[in-house]
Image (cartoon, coloured by chain):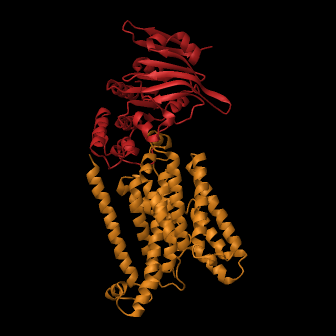
């Protein structure tokens, strides 16, 4: 009936976002402390050009912009998935305390010197922290129907994680590990290597696959949990898939970049009206837009002439927190 | 084969028996209403019948199959369910909500294959939703929303529709409109089971009334046979005048709470 034009429009939205991503990627490769013209950047990207150019592109700029993109995509996707499951536009890894908990576990591995045990230690710890927090929030969501209670539990979880972080920082043995932990708390993709990307990727891909695999059930949940079961949804399985998926993806993003807030709220919120508010169709464009936002914001922190480089997570919160307040103030269909 | 056949269903929670030894069968084309005071176990009985709760005793069969052995999807193909609370999470257009009725077939918003599109179109027509198709759900009145929910239940094309208080909180015109739509759905060979609180509506539209009190089914039959002043006093604790007309139509007038 109305399927075709709708599908064309969603396809168009996703295509436009992919095109914008390609554009921002190229921009990120050319801009920086040393500005590379586009032809030299492309030459180096495809293995030509001078050795110096290749190092700048392959070892510095490409891993960094890809890290920003992957983190943004993971957060946009996790946000969209959690929002669909909890039926609430304010659900997001940052707000629910998932990012903070992941960052705490990541910092703990740094503090206790466990990170040297192997390159997978940090991503594993971050993912574990994210899964633990997602599990707590989801358990709370099952017990209470109140959105406010849920957000408050998230706030409490965030604060508790922050308090433990503060404790670790307070007890930090030397300024070096203190600086390391501050970096995790503020969130940044500076100095990421291809290896960092490689070790976070499995968690991210697994999480993304789980979330995408469970997207149809999110559509059914728009009618409420009981009606969704009546439609034929296996509610328990749906919850497990989304929680596991969001935990894995968020854990991977924290392992890569520390805690970066609000992308998971802003990206789904902006694309939702363009996909007719269908929680299943929000996932893909939310991931793409999340990637776009963080890639663009990271270019911003690199080119802004500040004394010390701004952290990506700081900029994301500065831009995202007001949007959070705005959404909270004018949400419709409050249940 | 009956659309729903429950036998000896029992369920207790927190040491209290919510439903005890409930048995009945629903035939295609009948409009059955479940009536009884608040807390008499109507919603629990419905949830047991649909397999959303696991009974302590007894069995529920949907189109001949034990509901506890069916997957959620298989249940959805045999019975459409309209729960009491119907909160909408997102302001989606009406057509996408009706499309959700095709979930068990693999359809959904924006993805309606041939059969799905036809079923949705029929449900939309039956519930007269054409003018509202692209309206956002949060701009609809209560009566319009009730029609949207009914349409998505009808779009499943399940042989049984189970509705928990479908007419609650609607004004009198919409109450009758919704009941009329359910009655039309039974005309098409479906069985409908609805929890209804308004006894006037029950007397006017039901083919059959199942009376519940304190977890027991205390009466089961046509309105003309079961709607009596004595029963209203014992089940609902009200004083009422009941008159049965020559053609079997029943009218109820509640005078007030019984002493």
Count of labels in the image:
0
* Residue A178 x, y percent position in the rendering: 66, 79
Colour in which chain B is shown?
Answer: red
Report the side of B96 relative to A244 (left or right): left
* Residue B192 x, y percent position in the rendering: 41, 26
Q: Mark yes or no: residue B61 visible.
A: yes
Is residue B130 or residue B117 the one in the foreground?
A: B117
**Which quadrant holds residue A124?**
bottom right
* Residue B212 x, y percent position in the rendering: 55, 21
Q: Mark yes or no: residue A303 visible.
A: no
Above or below A275: residue B208: above
Above or below A11: residue B233: above
Report the side of A110 relative to B62 (left or right): right
Is residue B129 or residue A330 the one in the foreground?
A: B129
Residue at 47% over, 58% down: A210
Above or below B247: residue B139: below
Residue at 50% over, 55% down: A242
Residue at 70% over, 83% down: A174
Image quadrant where one finds the N terminus of chain A: top left
The orange chain is A
Residue positioned most to the top: B246
Is residue A203 or residue B70 the one in the foreground?
A: B70
């Amino acid at each position: 009936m109305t399927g075709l034009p709708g599908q064309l429009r969603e396809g168009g939205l996703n295509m436009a976002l992919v095109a914008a991503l390609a554009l921002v990627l190229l921009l990120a490769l050319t801009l920086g402390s040393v500005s590379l013209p586009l032809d030299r950047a492309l030459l180096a990207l495809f293995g030509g050009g001078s050795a110096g150019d290749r190092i700048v592109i392959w070892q510095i700029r490409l891993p960094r912009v890809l890290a920003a993109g992957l983190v943004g995509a993971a957060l946009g996707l996790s946000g969209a998935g959690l929002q669909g499951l909890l039926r609430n536009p304010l659900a997001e890894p940052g707000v629910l305390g998932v990012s903070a908990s992941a960052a705490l576990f990541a910092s703990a591995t740094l503090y206790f010197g466990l990170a040297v045990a192997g390159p997978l230690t940090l991503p594993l710890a971050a993912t574990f922290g994210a899964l633990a927090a997602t599990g707590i929030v989801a358990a709370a969501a099952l017990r209470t129907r109140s959105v406010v209670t849920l957000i408050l539990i998230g706030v409490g979880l965030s604060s508790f994680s922050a308090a433990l972080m503060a404790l670790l920082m307070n007890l930090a043995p030397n300024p070096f590990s203190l600086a390391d932990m501050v970096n995790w708390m503020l969130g940044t993709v500076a100095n990421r290597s291809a290896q960092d990307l490689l070790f976070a990727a499995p968690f991210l891909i697994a999480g993304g696959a789980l979330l995408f695999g469970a997207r149809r059930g999110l559509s059914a949940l728009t009618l409420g949990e009981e009606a969704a079961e009546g439609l034929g949804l296996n509610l328990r399985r749906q919850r497990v898939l989304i929680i596991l998926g969001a935990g894995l993806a968020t854990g991977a993003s924290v392992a890569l970049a520390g805690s970066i807030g609000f992308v998971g709220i802003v990206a789904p919120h902006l694309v939702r009206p363009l996909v007719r508010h269908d929680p299943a169709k929000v996932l893909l464009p939310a991931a793409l837009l999340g990637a776009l936002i963080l890639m663009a914001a990271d270019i911003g922190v690199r080119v802004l002439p500040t004394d010390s480089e701004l952290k990506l997570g700081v900029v994301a919160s500065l831009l995202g927190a007001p949007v959070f307040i705005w959404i909270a103030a004018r949400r419709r269909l409050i249940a | 084969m009956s659309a729903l056949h429950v036998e000896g269903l029992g369920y207790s929670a927190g040491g209290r028996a919510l439903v005890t030894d409930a048995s009945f069968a629903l035939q295609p084309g009948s409009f059955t209403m479940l009536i009884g005071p608040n807390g008499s176990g109507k919603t629990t009985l419905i949830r047991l019948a649909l397999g959303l709760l696991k009974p302590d005793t007894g069995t529920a069969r949907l189109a001949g199959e034990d509901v506890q052995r069916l997957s959620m999807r298989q249940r959805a193909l045999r019975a459409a369910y309209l729960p009491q609370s119907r909160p909408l999470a997102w302001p989606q257009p009406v057509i996408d909500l009706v499309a959700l009725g095709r979930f068990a077939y693999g359809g959904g918003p924006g993805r309606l294959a041939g059969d799905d599109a036809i079923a949705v179109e029929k449900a939309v027509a039956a519930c007269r939703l054409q003018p509202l198709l692209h309206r956002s759900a949060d701009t609809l009145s209560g009566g319009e929303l009730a029609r949207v929910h009914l349409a998505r239940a009808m779009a499943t094309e399940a042989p049984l529709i189970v509705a928990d208080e479908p007419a609650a909180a609607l004004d009198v015109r919409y109450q009758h409109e919704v009941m009329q739509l359910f009655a039309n759905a039974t005309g098409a060979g479906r069985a409908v089971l609805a929890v209804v609180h308004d006894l006037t509506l029950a007397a006017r539209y039901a083919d059959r009334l199942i009376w519940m009190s304190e977890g027991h089914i205390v009466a089961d039959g046509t309105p003309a046979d079961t709607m009596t002043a004595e029963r209203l006093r014992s089940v609902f604790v009200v004083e009422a005048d009941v008159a049965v007309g020559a053609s079997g139509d029943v009218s109820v007038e509640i005078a007030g709470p019984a002493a």
